[in-house]
Amino acid sequence: MKKCRGTVGPYEVIGAIVRRFLFSSSVISAIFGGWSTLQTTRRGPRDWRLALLWLSWAISLAIAIGTVVDEARERDGRN
């Protein structure tokens, strides 16, 4: 199969998307926050504060992913 000039393969598109998320400072921060939350879950007491900790981590991860998606849309010129 011949590749036309100027076209992008599916693996290149997926790679670009993954790089967008992996190299975003907000996503990296959320990943480290998740690691800290996991360590607290393993070592700390199990009470209502642990549930709030997981909830806050999930919210920060969602905000980080939303930020990356919004920046990509702005860069591509989509609203």
Image: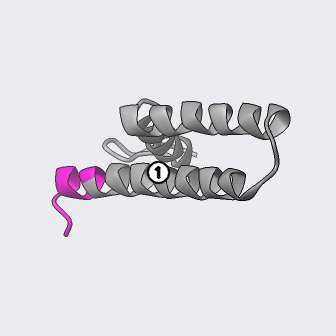
Give the camera-side residue of 68 and 32.
Answer: 32
Q: Which quadrant is home to the C terminus?
A: bottom left
Is residue 20 rendered to the left or right of residue 48? left
| Residue in the picture at 41% in, 45% down | 8
Name the kind of residue labelled 1 in the image.
Ser
User: Is 71 situated above or below 41?
Assistant: below
Secondary structure beneath label 1: helix
| Residue in the picture at 57% in, 55% down | 58
Could you tell me what secondary structure mostly forms the magenta stretch? helix
* Residue 50: percent from left, percent from top: 70, 51
Q: Counting other residues with Cα less than 10 Å from the Cα at mark 1, is it few (<14), some (14-19), or many (20 or more)?
A: some
Residue 44 part of the magenta-drawn span = no
Please give the range of residues in magenta.
71-79
Location of mark 1 (residue): 60
- Furthest residue in direction bottom, as rendered: 79
Is residue 47 rendered to the left or right of residue 75? right
Indicate the quadrant where residue 73 lies.
bottom left
| Residue in the picture at 19% in, 50% down | 75
* Residue 76: percent from left, percent from top: 21, 54
In this rendering, does residue 24 appear at all? no
User: Is 66 situated above or below 6?
Assistant: below
| Residue in the picture at 64% in, 31% down | 36
* Residue 45: percent from left, percent from top: 81, 42
Is residue 46 rendered to the left or right of residue 56? right
In this rendering, does residue 58 appear at all? yes
User: In this figure, which colouring scheme has been used for the structure?
Assistant: one colour
How many numbered callouts?
A: 1
* Residue 10: percent from left, percent from top: 53, 49
